[in-house]
């Protein structure tokens, strides 16, 4: 069975189109992560700011959106259940 290059390209293009808005919003929040003095935030302060910014803008991807394996395929079965449980506990 041979994989068609056009199918691979279409799949990659679709994934990139779906991830681009989330990545853009995250970079916006990271760019806004400044202290009152205008200096960049670091560490826990930056992480907290970005998390709050993303949740307010609605740009944070849901746990279901993040449930993908290292190859970009959707998780299923026990792996998805474990991931969802861990992800939702972290919110």
Image (spheres, rainbow, N blue to C red):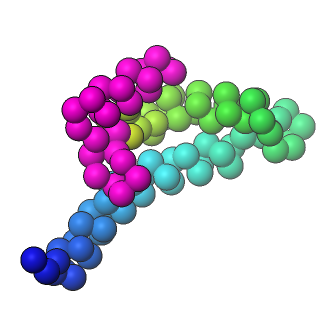
Look at 36% across and 48% down and name the residue there: 69
Q: Is residue 82 magenta?
A: yes
Q: Quadrant of residue 11?
A: bottom left
Pick the residue in front: 79 or 19. Answer: 79
Left or right placement of residue 49 versus residue 4 in this view: right
The residue lying at 41 percent from left, 53 percent from top is 70
Q: Residue at x 27, y 63 (%)?
A: 14
Residue 35: % across, % down: 82, 35
Residue numbers of the magenta segment: 67-91
Q: Is residue 64 above or below residue 19?
A: above
Total label count? 0
Q: Which of the 4 image quadrants contains residue 41?
A: top right
Of the pair 82 and 8, the residue shown nearer to us: 82
**Residue 73 lies in the magenta-colored region:** yes
Q: Quadrant of the N terminus?
A: bottom left
Q: Measured from the top left, where is residue 12 in percent x and y?
A: 30, 68
- Which is more toward the observer, 2 or 91? 2
- Seen in the picture, residue 72 relative to 33 is either above or below; the reply is below
Q: Residue 4: image x %, image y %? A: 16, 81
The extreme left residue here reads 1
Residue 65 at x, y = what percent? 33, 40
Can the viewer see residue 65?
no
Is residue 16 visible to us here?
yes
Residue at the farthest top position: 89
* Horizontal side, residue 72 vs residue 54: left or right: left
Residue in the image at 61% along x and 43% along y: 29
Locate residue 24 relative to residue 10 in the image: left or right: right
């Amino acid at each position: 069975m041979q994989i068609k290059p056009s199918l691979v390209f279409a799949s990659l293009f679709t994934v990139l189109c779906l991830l681009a808005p989330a990545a853009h919003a995250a970079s916006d929040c990271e760019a806004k992560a400044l202290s009152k003095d205008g200096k960049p935030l670091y560490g826990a302060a930056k992480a907290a700011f970005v998390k709050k910014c993303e949740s307010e803008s609605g740009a944070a991807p849901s746990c279901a959106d993040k449930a993908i394996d290292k190859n970009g395929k959707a998780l299923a079965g026990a792996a998805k259940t474990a991931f969802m449980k861990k992800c939702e506990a972290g919110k």
